[in-house]
Image: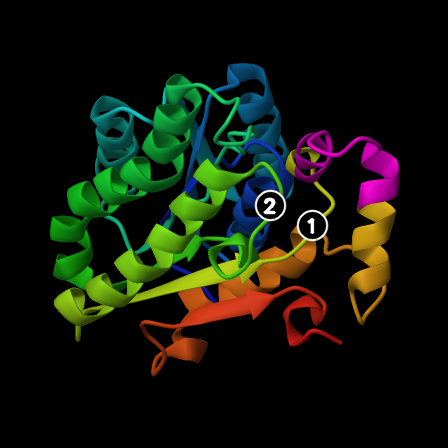
Amino acid sequence: MNRLKGKTAIVTGGTSGMGRGIAELFAAEGAAVVIGGRDVDRGREVVDGITAAGGVATCVSGDIATVEANQALVDAAVKRFGGVDILVPNAGVLGIGGVKDSSIETWQQTIDINLNAVYYLIKLAVPHLLERGGSIVVNGSIAAFKAFPNHPAYCASKGALVSLVRQLAIDLAPTIRVNILCPGQVDTPLLWDSAKAFPDPKTAVQDAIDRIPLKRLGTPEDIAKAVLFLASDESSWITGTALTIDGGLMTGG
């Protein structure tokens, strides 16, 4: 407990799934959390839950693909909590559709949310992170390293994030650490949306579980614990790393 005491964190996509798990764990560990999300009601629900548990949080709604929404998150952290210590760009979309049948708009939206928005948030927050030192943990995907049927925009965006993180780790050292977490299949609404790219979604998910050496899907709590480690001082000598957390899937076992 209290591994993030006195810290302020921004978590995008924090109203559901992995982002919600991260926001709740960060608050339990003492951080003041600024949650970014599109759904005002879900954001209020997460903030109310954190507050009831004795934590501190606020939610800023907006279209994360815009510079303005990212600026609003940084402004909220600085004005309400005095600065920024931790960034977790977590928001993402799938952009399902193969190159033969998906629209240009799907490609653009996926790149805007999964890649451009990450850059916007980091760029806008860096001046504040430099004042206090800090940690950036990007939520990526094993899709950076392997293909998934009918997910070209998603895979491309996640692969680009790995390259971006490695570059920023050099550019922002030694004051700011930058790492990326690359989850496998995690039991969230996004996973089940992804499964719709297959003829039988339930069978597709079960097939995925069967290929995982640990024989289960990940949980938002699994991801949150790994993000906490990378965000905290416990990983003070780790930067530029892509940490795979997938139950062993990428081992090929």
Segment colored magenta: 191-204
Mark 2 Cα-neighbour bin, 10 Å: few <14, some 14–19, many ≥20: many
The answer to which of marks 2 and 1 sits earlier in the sequence is 2
> How dense is the environment of label 1, judged by Cα within 10 Å: few (below 14), some, or many (20 and up)?
many
Q: Is residue 245 above or below residue 140?
A: below
Residue position for label 2: 18
Which color scheme does this rendered protein use?
rainbow
Residue type at the position of mark 2: Met
Disc 2 and disc 1 in contact, CB within 8 angstroms: yes
Q: Which residue occupies the extreme bottom position in the image?
A: 237
Question: Can you give x and y, in whole percent of width and height, for residue 142 in the image?
Answer: 55, 58
**Which numbered marker is on residue 186?**
1
Give 58 or 205, whichever is nearer the viewer: 205
- x 57%, y 36%: residue: 51
Under mark 1, the amino acid is Val
The answer to which image quadrant residue 70 occupies is: top left
Reply yes or no: does residue 57 show up in magenta: no
Q: Is residue 193 magenta?
A: yes
| Secondary structure category for the residue under label 1 | loop
Question: Residue, x 42% and y 77% (percent of image)?
Answer: 235
The front one of 200 and 179 is: 200
Which image quarter holds the C terminus? bottom right
Give residue 105's quadrant in the image. top left
Relative to 155, is 34 on the left or the right?
left
Q: Nearer the viewer, residue 151 or 215?
A: 151
* SS for dot 2: helix
Residue 160 is left or right of residue 148, and the answer is left
Q: Position of residue 61 (x, y in %)?
A: 41, 21
